[in-house]
Amino acid sequence: MRKIIAIWTAKLASRFARLLGKNGSSMPGTIALKICPDILTRMCGDIEKDIIAVWGTNGKTTTNNMIYTVLDNGENRIVCNKVGSNMLSGVVAAFISYSTLSGKVKADYACLEMDEAYARIILQYLTPTKIVITNLFRDQMDRYGEIDTTISYIQKALDKAENATLILNGDDPLTASLGKNYKNTLYYGISKNLGLNLNETREGRYCRFCGAELKYDFYQYGQLGLYRCEKCGFKRPKPQYDGENIKIGDYVSFDVNSAHVDLPCKGVYNIYNALAAFALADSCGMDKKEIAEGLQRYKGQTGRMEEFHIGGKLVVFNLAKNPAGFNQSIGNIISEKRTKDVIIGINDNDPDGNDVSWLWDVDFEKLNNDTIKSYTAAGIRAKDMGVRFKYCGIDESKITVSDDMKQNIINAVKGEGECVYIVVNYTLLFSTKKILSDLEGEL
């Protein structure tokens, strides 16, 4: 009875929140847990096939939604926290949204993004049969601490799911190291040097097993690449899912295991996300052609290279939360051949991380080029971002510092550039999305 009362109350609260225009993605789960603390364990028993967990610093929301899109072939029923609410309450809310009033969750799969530092808590209530880990980068130092702390959290979670199939990014030595002594491990990666030549801050320079410095034949981006430890023999594992014949442009395409994938997304990082989704779906027994078709259907979520058309101009909106994510966004901006106006929005609320010193680890210097007509620093820490622009050597007459995001976007749309790029961190995501949606109808 407690379970049913919890579900009814949570559903009513969710409906009320929507009427008030609130996002409320995790709020129903918070309410349900207060009424029935073990509600997640009770609902997970209704999943007929696999419970899939997706962890990692960058790309987990995109990867999770790619997996959902592929599995959603008209035959499968899937529970998924699509909007990225990835704490315990968010996962519970996802189950409640798919449950009947009688408390039943009629689903073949549960596809669940989880915060990598919080997964060990969630796994007290459910046991995934498959776990995808995208990558591990330094992120929100005041919350996660050093990268070794995050890895220790993940290891504790893995100890609770020792029989799961682990699907790992083999090009990331930090992620790949987690599979060394694991029973069932599959790897994905890109064996050919893509020649990106990015000058980035590298994580995981040293072998996790012996402490020696890793040697690289090449980097793809960040610490992802072809590596080896000459002291203990740890090296990049041979991937079972190897991206080949890669083409990078407005969209990307690649081959994997005799299947061709045309992905309606930009960025090499989305190739990695798609390889993870492909490996997961293949491990579930799906037909490879059907998987490729599913990836081609994928549409980006809020702030994942999302496109708007405002005042006759293309506006590209992206979320970035840490140096690795921002460097990839910068790569997309400078690869755009058209002239553009750029807005960077930085908040320092708790979900963002209160310490913004990481801005100095981002390669913003690459934005100092003639194709960018104006630079706007926005958000709570707009002044910090404005100073960062200044130290890139950018002409100060091109820099605007303002926390009025709506006016910033209007000014950029009316600017000299042929298009507009907006990159924000987490707590600016939904408010900026609403402004963009409103302006799309007004201008």
Image: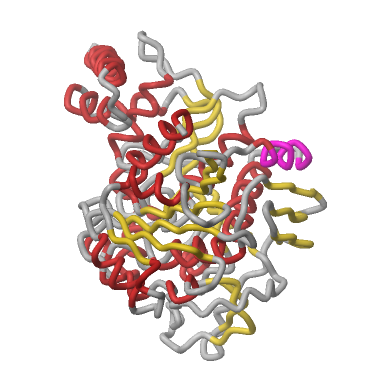
Total marks shown come to 0
Q: Main secondary structure of the magenta part?
A: helix
- Residue under the point 68% across and 51% down: 251
Judge whether residue 127 is colored magenta. no
Tell which of 109 and 232 is nearer to you.
109
- Above-or-below relation of 25 to 115: above
- Residue under the point 44% across and 56% down: 56
Q: Residue furthest left?
A: 34
Residue 164 visible in the picture = no
Residue 261 visible in the picture = yes
Quadrant of the image occupied by residue 204: bottom left
- The magenta-colored residue range is 288-296
Judge whether residue 292 is colored magenta. yes
From the viewer's perspective, tell me whether residue 309 is left or right of residue 377. Answer: right
Tell me, what colour scheme is on the image? Answer: secondary structure
x, y percent for residue 330: 50, 65
Tell which of 346 and 219 is nearer to you.
346
From the viewer's perspective, tell me whether residue 282 is left or right of residue 170. Answer: right
x, y percent for residue 231: 52, 90
